[in-house]
Image: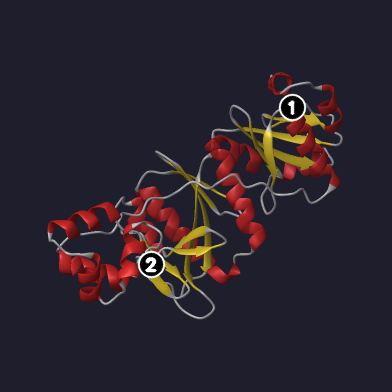
Amino acid sequence: MFNKSYLVNRLVDSLSKKEFQLFLTRGCFDIVARKDFLMLIKALTNVDGLVQEQAQSLKAISYFISAYPLVVSEKTNRTSLEDKIIYSRFELPVVTPTMFECIIEEEVIPEIKTIKGKHIVTINTVYLRKKREELNLSLEKLSKQIGISKKALYEIEKQRVNPTLETVERLEELLRVDLKVPYEMKTVERTCIEPKNEFQKKVSLEFFRLGVDNSAVNSASFKIIGKEKTSLITGLSDNTIKIKKTVLQVKGLSSIFSSQGIFVAKRSHEQAIDGVPIVLESELPELESSKELNKLIKEKKE
């Protein structure tokens, strides 16, 4: 039986063997892994423990830093997860540790998802139609041979629906061809989260005014993620003491994200802590552009 520590250690070991650069954290993701691409990984022994707030933050961060989000888990409340299947929670891909290891080993894995208890497969529909026509099989004749309706096969060929695993296996056996499309990790669409408090809202609005697209973040060591030319991860704090508690996390994450990390504070006598610039809340309204913000950040780092 897996526990959280064992699961994280297994994933870290697998990633280390493939020479990924790693950073461990807590919150909406547990592992940052960078090699030729960037992944944000949430490890859960039970995927039903993933809550929507975590998922939304994970998607928002992934969008702004151009990372692939991935949830790795062993089971749900009712059953164990199957290897070779891509599950989904809050529009995030969920895989088993074994499946995860196949992905980072760059094995060719068919894209098989589960929807409402059925295994659904992404296939090459152009190849399907080509092989059907080469064998002089009409839609009606082929559909009868594999046990589905003519309309269902038509919808599959037109990419309006994805077939079940059983249907694909019958098609592949009859046509003697591999139709399954290999699984590829995907980036997420823009996700933006509403701020939870006035401080977060004020800083977010100031960033928008300066031309920095951004989103609030929950369940992380920073509270705003943004992007202009490069991504900007921003911690929020009332004072210097609170900044010191999370500065190493923000610094480490900004490094592996290849981002700029800063803190926005209501008050502080420091210009920077451990190389992370501290911008005062009162300084933001005085700025007129993201260029001026970047200049201020640079001055505080020096």
In the rendering, at what x and y percent does residue 250 appear? 65, 40
Task: Say which mark, if any, is on residue 120.
Answer: 2
Q: Quadrant of residue 224?
A: top right
Q: Is residue 117 left or right of residue 90?
A: left
Q: Tell me if residue 202 can be seen.
A: yes
Q: Which residue appears at 35% of the width and 66% of the height? A: 163
Query: What crowding class fits label 2: few (fewer than 14 Cα within 10 Å), some (14-19), or many (20 or more)?
Result: many
Judging from the image, what secondary structure is the residue with disc 1 in?
loop
Figure quadrant of the C terminus: top right
In the rendering, at what x and y percent does residue 167 appear? 29, 71
Say above or below: 208 vs 176. Answer: above
Judging from the image, what secondary structure is the residue with disc 2 in?
strand
For marks 2 and 1 on the same chain, the one whose residue lies earlier in the sequence: 2
Q: Which residue appears at 49% of the width and 46% of the height? A: 187
In the rendering, at what x and y percent does residue 273 appear? 72, 32
How far apart are labels 2 and 1 at the CA level? 45 Å
Q: Is residue 128 left or right of residue 96?
A: left
The residue where tag 1 is placed is: 210
Q: Tell me if residue 27 can be seen.
A: no
In the rendering, at what x and y percent does residue 95 appear? 43, 63
Task: Say which mark, if any, is on residue 150.
Answer: none
- Name the one closer to the observer, 244 or 299: 299
Say what amino acid the circle numbered 1 marks. Leu
